[in-house]
Amino acid sequence: MVMVNILDQELIKQTEEICAARGVRFTPQRKQVFQLICASPKASSAYELLEQLQITEPKAKPPTVYRALDFLLEQGFIHRVESTNSFIQCCSCNAHKHYSHLLICDKCSNVIELQDDSLVALLANNAEKHGFTITNHVIESHGICLSCSSNTEE
Ligand SMILES: [Zn+2]
Ligand SMILES: [Zn+2]
């Protein structure tokens, strides 16, 4: 996630290839919103994305951003951070649909995505004991990231 900017071009190319293989259209607006999400070191809200998009596309309206976000979510390129209503890029956009454990820094809004199948299996197992079938998860932890906690110690 720290490598986002360096990997940006490679990631866009990879994402284009995935879209081509899936036969879905990676329109310029969808691409731009994705690039904005990738470029931001922190989770971005739809409003922030709209403001940034309007710098190059003054005519962009909220539905432009929401439609692009829906597409990116559907394709699994980004995740919604439910507790802060913002968006981050997925750390493995080629992966199948997966549940992530998100570590959200309350100081800098940086989000770290962890994929731990054993955690998801544990949750499913616990639910099963109650005859409950899980169809969706929101696994989000709030706290202070490493760089913020080392900054305060200086
Ligand atoms: Zn992911
Ligand atoms: Zn932080």
Image (spheres, helix red, strand yellow):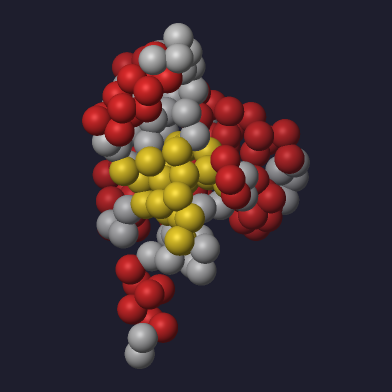
Decide which of 122, 87 is in the foreground and name it. Answer: 122
Query: Is the residue 123 above or below the residue 134 in the image?
Result: below
Query: What percent of the width, then of the height, locates residue 44?
Result: 56, 52
Q: Is residue 124 left or right of residue 67?
A: left
Q: Which residue lies furthest to the top in this view?
A: 131
Is residue 35 at all visible to an observer of this figure? no
Query: Is the residue 62 above or below the residue 135 in the image?
Result: below
- Which residue sits at x=58%, y=28%? 70
Quadrant position of residue 144:
bottom left
- Which residue sits at x=47%, y=28%? 137
Q: Residue furthest front?
A: 130
Decide which of 57, 87 is in the foreground and name it. Answer: 87
Total marks placed: 0
Is residue 71 at all visible to an observer of this figure? yes
- Which residue sits at x=26%, y=29%? 117
Q: In this view, does 38 lie to the left or right of 96?
A: right
Q: Is residue 141 left or right of residue 125?
A: right
Query: What percent of the width, then of the height, locates residue 127?
Result: 42, 19
Query: Is the residue 87 above or below the residue 122 in the image?
Result: below
Q: Which residue lies furthest to the bottom in this view?
A: 154
Query: What percent of the width, then of the height, locates residue 149?
Result: 38, 75
Query: What percent of the width, then of the height, locates residue 3?
Result: 28, 57
Decide which of 86, 129 is in the foreground and name it. Answer: 129
- Which residue sits at x=35%, y=90%? 154
Decide which of 152, 71 is in the foreground and name it. Answer: 152
Q: In this view, does 62 lie to the left or right of 111?
A: right
